[in-house]
């Protein structure tokens, strides 16, 4: 009797117990996997390498884990993985090296006229597309005419708006004429989208490039398989017989695959995962500083941010070093409230640092401001945060630090699509935004800090700053530009509307079976054509 | 005397006693926990970042150097307030609707039950996500923490009211033809009096069990919503939210995920054991009574 009474209830308990256990198992599955997987792929790897004897030519296949690609047309690519694939199938006219210097690629040499308006490029000889047709100046003209066509619907149209004409001045010579001097024009030409496609290409997304690797097969959402282009024009490249980009949805899965030997290279991962790889045998970990950063900004065009004392109080209440240590675990670099990051050579002045944390001074400033304007010394603002990267963590630490100065903020973590959707991020008073690493700093200023910047999220307007930005973006005198950037840094450190607590590091991890790997600050532009299999 | 015997029956069974003890401990933690936390649950302790469990930090510290034990303890109150409050509202509404619907029958019963069928056909988590999404669209992303808490509270009430209503209704249906109800009706007693005095007592055992069950599922649902990032906002020490944060840092600070995950498991199982024991105790008592009669 007792049994029949209790059965339904027991079943319910059992079900709940199972549900809880399932949740636990799901949550810890990725961590459990790596410990028991290595045995299986270990048998697979040696079987693969001897199959390709050390005959003449490159050997070995590098398998790279990346998020899935969607766009294949160089004019439309945007994500790291899309740029990575395109960069190995196509070639840039000029490239950027890991130190952010301009480097030759299809253009072997160039001359710039005195007035900075005419650029003449000499192109490499003997280059062919993967379909066998020869490469010439006409392909360069076609590519850039397409990218700058205002009616073409490509994002690069405004970037190349300062080009007056592009002409093939020889079979292997191209001349660009500008409407105004642009000291960053070579960097503009190395833009992620500026990969040379064949003149008149019916479908620019069909992988007919001149690059070091040819596409063998592409299975959307699964992988793209490439093989060495034996006719590649740069001697000794590529150093590998094949390249495979295998698609993963998240960094945890990528790292597990690297541990298990299913992939050889992972770029971009969370700090926690990177830390966990450092002790892994057979894997080399790399971290390089970048110029990318997360910024915290307060709208400067309305209360409370329209009084400089308020932003000053926030700056005084922030401990950048503690945030960097906690959120970035000491990778990358401490921020100094300016987008001129530590990798910008002479532009970056390490001596310019923001005010040292002083909680009492912050509190006093806010109380003074509140007494004068009738504002709330606790501010009571909502801090809007996209849910990606370390941003929610940054918000949590800021909330604590500011609370010590009596500042109350409430965190609203939002999916990236919501944060950036309908330009809501430009509307809110207090927000955290991530900015990726760029090879030169002018972009951040014209887009984010100039009065008329398209993404002037702080709604800041400062005549002195606007003038300095204009100078830095137009002068052909390098010393003058260095001076302009340094003045901008000191203005931003003392009274700018943004707090930049740290510059990110870029993480990568590669199997020790490969040599010659060099990572770039923008992961997608990392070039593996020089990588070789270790003997 | 009657109450006493139920409690005694409950505690006589080891599993039920364990469940009762866990729930009691949980309630104590919710009431006194925030005052007892050894560290501020939201404050980073800069000199002990990501330290494993130790005498000083019983559950270690998390990726932002916050004491995990303090966070788990502090999280008990919001879990109890939301789960308990949501369950209470669901039980009140569900009982009222179930009694009227079951006793009156007819078109009112049909309309209410078909509507509830529609709600019940959706999985609880899906319905909760739908409702929270709608609330958020209506009131914007930037509703206050209290607003978000109220949202979760409301969602629990809406999701669980139909379930409670169906249980009460089935009891009401079963007893409405009984002699003592007929007698009350013939005496000319009014509807509320009949419902409360004659029918509700018959539904009480089932209702008590249902409430305890709903409570345990509510804790689970709140944690699921926190895990998915649609419930309470960080850095609040919500258990589900902590599991999700811990999951992202699992490779470095596994204890920060295990502590809240195991806590959720223990409390949910405890509440289930209690519901189970309550049900058995009540049924045994009824059997005893029938035998005595």
Image (cartoon, grey):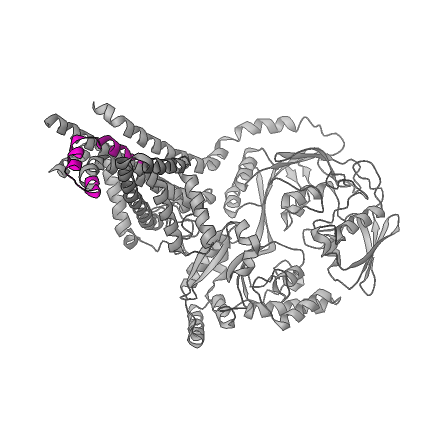
Give the quadrant of the N terminus of chain B.
top left
Q: Is residue B31 above or below residue B204?
A: below
Residue B180 located within the stretch drawn in magenta:
yes
Q: Residue A91: x, y in percent?
A: 75, 45
Q: Main secondary structure of the magenta part?
A: helix
Residue, x 40% and y 44% (percent of image)?
B240
Does residue A281 show up?
Answer: no
Q: Is residue A349 above or below residue B163?
A: below
State the residue in front, A252 or B11. Answer: B11
Q: Residue B118: x, y in percent?
A: 40, 36
Q: Is residue B279 above or below residue A148?
A: above
Question: Residue A135 lies in what quarter of the image?
Answer: top right
Start-end of magenta stretch: B166-195
Q: Is residue B3 left or right of residue B230?
A: left
Q: Residue A252: x, y in percent?
A: 52, 40
State the residue in front, A45 or B209. Answer: B209
Q: Is residue A92 above or below residue A206?
A: below
Residue, x 84% and y 40% (percent of image)?
A134
């Amino acid at each position: 009797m007792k049994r029949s009474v209790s059965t339904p209830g027991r079943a319910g308990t059992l079900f709940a117990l199972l549900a809880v256990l399932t949740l636990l198992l799901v949550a810890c599955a990725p961590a459990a996997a790596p410990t028991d997987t290595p045995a299986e792929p270990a048998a697979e790897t040696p079987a693969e390498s001897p199959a390709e004897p050390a005959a003449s030519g490159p050997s070995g296949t590098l398998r790279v884990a990346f998020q899935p690609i969607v766009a294949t047309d160089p004019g439309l690519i945007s994500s790291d993985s899309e740029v990575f694939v395109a960069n190995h199938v196509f070639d840039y006219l000029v490239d950027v090296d890991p130190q952010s210097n301009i480097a030759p690629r299809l253009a072997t040499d160039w001359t710039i006229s005195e007035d900075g308006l005419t650029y003449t490029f000499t192109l490499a000889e003997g280059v062919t597309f993967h379909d066998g047709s020869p490469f010439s100046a006409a392909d360069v003209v076609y590519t850039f005419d397409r990218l700058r066509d205002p009616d073409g619907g490509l994002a690069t149209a405004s970037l190349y708006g300062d080009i007056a004409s592009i002409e093939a001045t020889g079979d292997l010579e191209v001349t660009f004429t500008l409407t105004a001097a642009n000291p960053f024009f070579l960097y503009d030409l190395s833009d992620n989208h500026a990969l040379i496609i064949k003149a008149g290409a019916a479908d620019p997304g069909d992988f007919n490039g001149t690059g070091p690797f040819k596409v063998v097969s592409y299975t959307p959402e699964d992988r793209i398989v490439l093989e060495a282009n034996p006719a590649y024009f740069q001697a000794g490249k590529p150093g590998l017989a094949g390249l495979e980009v295998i698609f993963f949805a998240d960094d945890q899965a990528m790292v597990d695959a690297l541990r298990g030997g299913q992939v050889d290279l992972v770029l971009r991962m969370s700090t926690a995962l990177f830390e966990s790889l450092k002790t892994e045998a057979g894997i080399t970990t790399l971290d390089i500083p970048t110029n990318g950063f997360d910024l915290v900004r307060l709208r400067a065009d309305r209360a409370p941010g329209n009084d400089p004392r308020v932003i000053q109080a926030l700056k005084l209440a922030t401990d950048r070093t503690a945030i960097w240590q906690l959120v970035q675990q000491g990778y990358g670099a401490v921020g100094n409230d300016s987008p001129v990051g530590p990798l910008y050579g002479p532009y970056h002045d390490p001596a310019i640092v923001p005010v040292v944390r002083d909680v009492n001074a912050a509190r006093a400033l806010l109380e003074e401001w509140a007494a004068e304007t009738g504002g709330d010394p606790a501010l009571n603002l909502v801090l809007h945060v996209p849910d990606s990267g370390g941003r929610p963590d940054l918000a949590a630490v800021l909330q604590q630090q500011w609370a010590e100065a009596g500042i109350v903020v409430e965190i609203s973590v939002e999916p990236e699509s919501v944060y950036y959707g309908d330009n809501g991020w430009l509307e809110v008073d207090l927000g955290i935004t991530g900015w990726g690493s760029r090879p030169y700093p002018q972009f951040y200023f014209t887009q984010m800090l100039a009065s008329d910047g398209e993404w002037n999220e702080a709604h800041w307007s400062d005549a002195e700053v606007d003038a300095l930005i204009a100078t830095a973006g137009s002068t052909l005198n390098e010393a003058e530009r260095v001076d302009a950037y340094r003045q901008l840094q000191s203005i931003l450190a003392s009274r700018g509307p943004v707090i930049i607590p740290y510059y990110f590091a870029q993480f990568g991890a590669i199997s020790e079976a490969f040599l010659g790997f060099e990572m770039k600050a923008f992961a997608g532009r990392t070039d593996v054509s020089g990588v070789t299999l270790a003997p | 005397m009657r109450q006493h015997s139920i409690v005694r029956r409950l505690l006589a069974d080891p599993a039920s006693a364990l469940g009762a003890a866990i729930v009691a401990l949980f309630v104590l933690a919710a009431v006194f926990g925030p005052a007892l936390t050894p560290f501020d649950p939201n404050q980073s302790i800069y000199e002990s970042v990501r330290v494993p469990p130790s005498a000083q930090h019983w559950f270690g510290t998390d990726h932002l150097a916050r004491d995990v034990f303090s966070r788990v303890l502090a999280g008990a109150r919001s879990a109890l307030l939301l789960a308990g409050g949501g369950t209470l509202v669901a039980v009140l509404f569900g009982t009222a609707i179930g009694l009227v619907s079951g006793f009156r029958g007819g078109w009112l019963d049909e309309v209410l039950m078909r509507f509830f069928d529609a709600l019940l056909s959706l999985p609880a988590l899906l319905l909760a996500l739908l409702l929270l999404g709608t609330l958020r669209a209506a009131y914007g992303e930037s509703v206050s923490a209290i607003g978000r808490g109220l949202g979760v509270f409301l969602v629990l009430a809406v999701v669980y009211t139909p379930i409670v209503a169906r249980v009460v209704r089935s009891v009401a249906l079963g007893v409405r033809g009984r002699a003592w109800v007929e007698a009350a009706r013939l005496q000319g007693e009014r509807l509320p009096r009949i419902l409360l005095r004659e029918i509700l007592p018959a539904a009480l055992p089932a209702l008590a069990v249902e409430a305890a069950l709903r409570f345990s599922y509510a804790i689970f649902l709140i944690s699921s919503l926190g895990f998915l990032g649609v419930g309470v906002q960080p850095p609040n020490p919500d258990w589900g939210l902590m599991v999700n944060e811990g999951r992202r840092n699992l490779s470095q600070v596994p204890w920060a995920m295990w502590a809240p995950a195991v806590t959720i498991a223990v409390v949910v199982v405890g509440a289930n054991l209690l519901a189970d024991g309550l049900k058995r105790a009540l049924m045994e008592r009824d059997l005893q009574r029938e035998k005595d009669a």
